[in-house]
Amino acid sequence: METPKCPSCSSEYTYELSDTTFGCSECGAEFSQDDINNKEEIFVVLDSEGNQLKTGDSVVIIKDLPVKGMPKPIKKGTKVKNIRINEFGKNEHFIDSKIDGFGSIGLKGSVVKLSK
């Protein structure tokens, strides 16, 4: 039987501890086959450069965004602080944010990049 990947760090370097448990060489986690089967899929949002975004990150808008009902678009280069990842966003707008001078808006990962 092939040893499974670690559910904590996804390492392939795992080993059998007993008939029912495994260990990870990289992170030291101990887990069973049930832990692997019950592991939930983690919801991931990527920015335009492929970086993973997390709640609390700051991002920069990479292109002008026209907004229906607003006289001016949200300008390229606008910094958005303290985003929130929302798994249930509509039409791929998985980033909930507040933009100064505009208000609350949902953004797509393809129109932002992670701010350093």
Image (spheres, grey):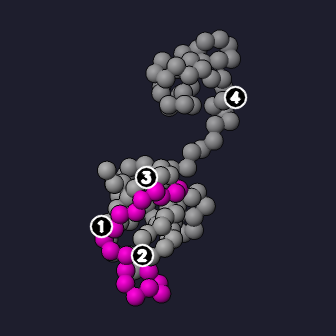
**Mark 2 sits on what residue?**
101
Q: Residues within 10 Å of mark 1 (few under 14, many from 20)?
A: some
Mark 4 or 2, nearer chain start: 4
Is label 3 in a helix, a strand or a loop? loop
Residue 77 higher or lower than 83, as above or below: below
Residue at 59% across, 44% down: 41
Nearest to viewer (mark 4 / mark 2): 2
55 in magenta: no
Residue at 50% across, 52% down: 55
**Mark 3 sits on what residue?**
57
Say which mark, if any, is on residue 77: 1
Is label 4 in a helix, a strand or a loop? helix
The alpha-carbon separation of the residues under discs 4 and 2 comes to 49 Å
**Mark 4 sits on what residue?**
34
Nearest to viewer (mark 4 / mark 3): 3
Disc 3 residue type? Answer: Asp
Looking at the rendering, which quadrant does residue 64 occupy? bottom left
Disc 4 residue type? Answer: Asp
Nearest to viewer (mark 2 / mark 3): 2
The magenta stretch is 67-85
